[in-house]
Amino acid sequence: MTYLTTEDIAASLHLSNDTVRRMCSKGTIVATKVGRQWLVDDADFDGFRARYRGRKVPSPRADEPKRGRRRVA
């Protein structure tokens, strides 16, 4: 059983390390937190790649409401 770090995954998906950490934290990528580091089983990452192959990787904050000021008319 081999494990990948968030840095390995970020390089593979051409994403930032922070984005991969948020995806692990939210559960988009199945991962285990060991101390301060997220580790992803190689088989779980292959499953993730198979599900999202050819798709844009979903934003980890896509379902959160937008923040900021609202205009009041």
Image: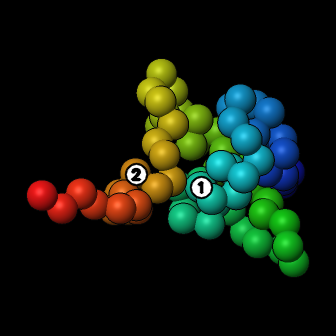
- Mark sitting on residue 23: 1
Residue at (83% x, 41% y) in the render: 8
Instruction: Assess whether mark 1 and mark 2 are in contact (beta carbons under 8 angstroms).
Output: no
Please give left or right for residue 48 compared with residue 4 in the image: left
Please give left or right for residue 70 compared with residue 30 in the image: left
Mark toward the viewer: 2 or 1: 2
x and y, in percent, of residue 38 in the image: 78, 63
Q: Secondary structure at mark 1?
A: helix
Instruction: Give the position of the C terminus as an image quadrant.
Output: bottom left
x and y, in percent, of residue 20 in the image: 68, 50
For the question of whether residue 41 can be seen, the reply is no
For the question of whether residue 49 can be seen, the reply is yes
Q: CA distance from mark 2 to mark 1?
A: 11 Å
Tag 2: residue type? Ala
- Mark sitting on residue 62: 2
Residue at (76% x, 72% y) in the render: 33
Locate residue 45: give its quadrant: top right
